[in-house]
Amino acid sequence: MTLAQGLFFGLIAVVLVQRIAELRLARRNEAWARSQAAREFGAGHYPLFFVLHGGWGIGWITEAAIRGPELAASWWGWVVGFVIAEGLRYWAIATLGQRWNTRILVIDGLPAIRTGPYRFLAHPNYLAVAIELICIPMVFGAWITAAVASVLNAALLLGIRIPAEQRAVREAANQTR
């Protein structure tokens, strides 16, 4: 097996295991949040992220497979970017603890978290995912997938998700438990 093939299959496995583990954690955190009378915001757009991430996964795998898979000239830089993004993402998840979720679930009266990476960035998890959506395809020169997924992700985040999340946090902070 070549380095390119090993990295190709390795990244598929890493992303698949990550997504499954994160969805399981999100379900567990959702159960906890709902037991605390959490309210959900933006449920209507939630499936769009499954479509985006599923399409991204199929896209980079297909585009890379069509190319060989062959490593891009600067593949190692993209791998380093991915590793840094994952560090940021898991720092954000750890900081939020039980409050982390793939859904927008807020518990009235709880203040927004301003520790960990949230001291520096309003949405560190979204930044990490945006970097991931670029880095993994670019390891294999799958620039079409990186570009399309990035544009769609930015549209969903900036046009729908972040405004819904900001509204939810404001409303929850103004409520008492």
Image (tube, grey):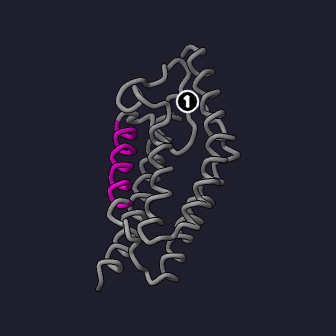
Q: Quadrant of the N terminus?
A: bottom left
What residue lies at 64% left-to-right and 27% top-to-bottom? 167
Q: Quadrant of the C terminus?
A: top right
Task: Using the rendered view, name the quadrant where residue 163 is placed.
Answer: top right
Give how far across and how far down residue 121 sits, in percent: 45, 31
Would residue 81 be found to the left or right of residue 167 on screen?
Answer: left
What residue lies at 41% left-to-right and 79% top-to-bottom? 70
Give how far across and how far down residue 95 sits, in percent: 36, 33
Would residue 117 be found to the left or right of residue 52 on screen?
Answer: left
Q: Amino acid at mark 1?
A: Val
Give how far across and how far down residue 107 sits, in percent: 53, 26
Up-down: is 11 above or below 119?
below
Up-down: is 160 above or below 55?
above
Task: Using the rendered view, name the quadrant where residue 91 is placed.
Answer: top left
Give how far across and how far down residue 41 sits, in percent: 64, 35
| Label 1 packing within 10 angstroms: few (<14), some (14-19), many (20+) | many
Magenta region, mostly helix, strand or loop? Answer: helix
What residue lies at 42% left-to-right and 23% top-to-bottom? 114
Residue pointed to by mark 1: 106
Secondary structure category for the residue under label 1: strand
Up-down: is 78 above or below 27?
below
- Which residue is at the front of the view, 21 or 33? 21
What residue lies at 68% left-to-right and 41% top-to-bottom? 160
- Which residue is at the front of the view, 135 or 172? 135
Task: Using the rendered view, name the quadrant where residue 75 is placed.
Answer: bottom left
Q: Is residue 12 magenta?
A: no
Q: Which stretch did the figure color magenta?
A: 78-94
